[in-house]
């Protein structure tokens, strides 16, 4: 696949924030899921966003991607205030995400699911798709390693293929910022490295990524920088090795070694 936009640099540009959260809080009744959270994501960076179960990671993704608005605080995308903007508008601006719980259309093939992802805010039949949409979907199948499953339904695809389908559907919207939720869950070591290679290549082509995962070894080997939250609050931020050695982070992970 020929990338839509390719940058010459392959390291994050710290002078440019693609995404910035300022004092973001999300409450559900009396429960505070995200608490006064602030951090930035640099241009063409792979940022790891980690924390124990229930720390508020997916809730933060939901606020950023427009699933629901934060209770307080501000979210900026390329210096534009996008707080509370609906998901379809954020997709048009260049933000896309994957989900822990797969959300394909099981009565459509893998190829058709990726075709449909290219027009997320319209209702139409598969027969209405243009030839270039199908061609683009084939390119994305090849890009994420799904060509052998293209004509199967999602129910016929193995777990690793379903994770790649989530990524392919997200890439169908041509995002500049990709939020990836648990991409290594249930994968073998070989499959984790294959997925990490895909993410690195996306970054080299100009995509900025934020990745959540509980596989600390795989994640910390992939990312440029890490933000750690616990009980909705940021407790650490830094390079992967700093996070590995941080006693506060180790304590948050039930007193164990992050590795």
Image (spheres, rainbow, N blue to C red):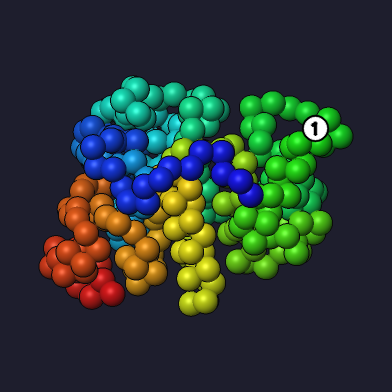
Which image quarter holds the C terminus?
Answer: bottom left
> Does the rendering let one see residue 210?
no
Left/right placement of residue 200 relative to residue 26 reads right
Image location (x, y in percent) of residue 60: 36, 42
Image location (x, y in percent) of residue 174: 56, 38
- Residue drawn at x 76%, y 56% as measured from the top left: 150
- Residue drawn at x 32%, y 51% as measured from the top left: 11
- Badge 1 is on which residue? 130
Towards the viewer: 8 or 134: 8
Disc 1 is placed on an element classified as loop
> Does the rendering let one see residue 13?
yes
Left/right placement of residue 42 relative to residue 114 reads left
- Residue drawn at x 27%, y 55% as measured from the top left: 225
Left/right placement of residue 242 relative to residue 105 reads left
In the image, residue 149 above or below residue 66: below
Density class for disc 1 (Cα within 10 Å; few <14, some 14-19, many ≥20) is few
Which residue sits furthest front?
8
Image location (x, y in percent) of residue 221: 34, 68
Which residue sits furthest left?
247
In the image, residue 133 above or below residue 83: below
Where, by quadrant of the figure, is residue 78 drawn?
A: top left
Where, by quadrant of the figure, is residue 236 drawn?
A: bottom left
- Residue drawn at x 39%, y 55% as measured from the top left: 212
Which residue sits furthest right?
127
């Amino acid at each position: 696949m020929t990338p839509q936009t390719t940058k010459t640099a392959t390291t994050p540009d710290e002078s440019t924030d693609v995404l910035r959260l300022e004092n973001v809080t999300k409450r559900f009744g009396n429960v505070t899921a995200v608490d006064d959270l602030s951090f930035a994501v640099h241009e063409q960076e792979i940022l790891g966003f980690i924390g124990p179960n229930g720390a508020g990671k997916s809730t933060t993704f939901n606020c950023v991607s427009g699933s629901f608005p934060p209770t307080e605080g501000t979210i900026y995308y390329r210096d534009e205030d996008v707080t509370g903007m609906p998901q379809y508008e954020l997709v048009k601006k260049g933000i896309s995400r994957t989900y822990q719980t797969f959300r394909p259309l099981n009565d459509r093939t893998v190829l058709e699911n990726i075709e449909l992802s290219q027009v997320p805010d319209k209702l139409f039949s598969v027969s209405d798709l243009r030839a270039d949409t199908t061609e683009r979907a084939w390119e994305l199948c090849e890009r994420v390693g799904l060509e052998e499953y293209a004509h199967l339904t999602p129910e016929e695809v193995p777990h690793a293929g379903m994770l790649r389908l989530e990524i392919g559907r997200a890439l169908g919207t041509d995002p500049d910022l990709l939020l990836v939720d648990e991409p290594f869950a249930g994968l073998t070591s070989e499959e984790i490295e294959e997925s990490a290679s895909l993410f690195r290549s996306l970054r080299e082509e100009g995509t900025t990524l934020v990745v959540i995962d509980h596989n600390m070894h795989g994640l910390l080997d992939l990312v440029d920088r890490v933000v750690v939250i616990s009980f909705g609050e940021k407790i650490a931020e830094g390079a992967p090795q700093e996070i590995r050695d941080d006693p506060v982070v180790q304590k948050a992970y039930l007193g164990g070694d992050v590795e």
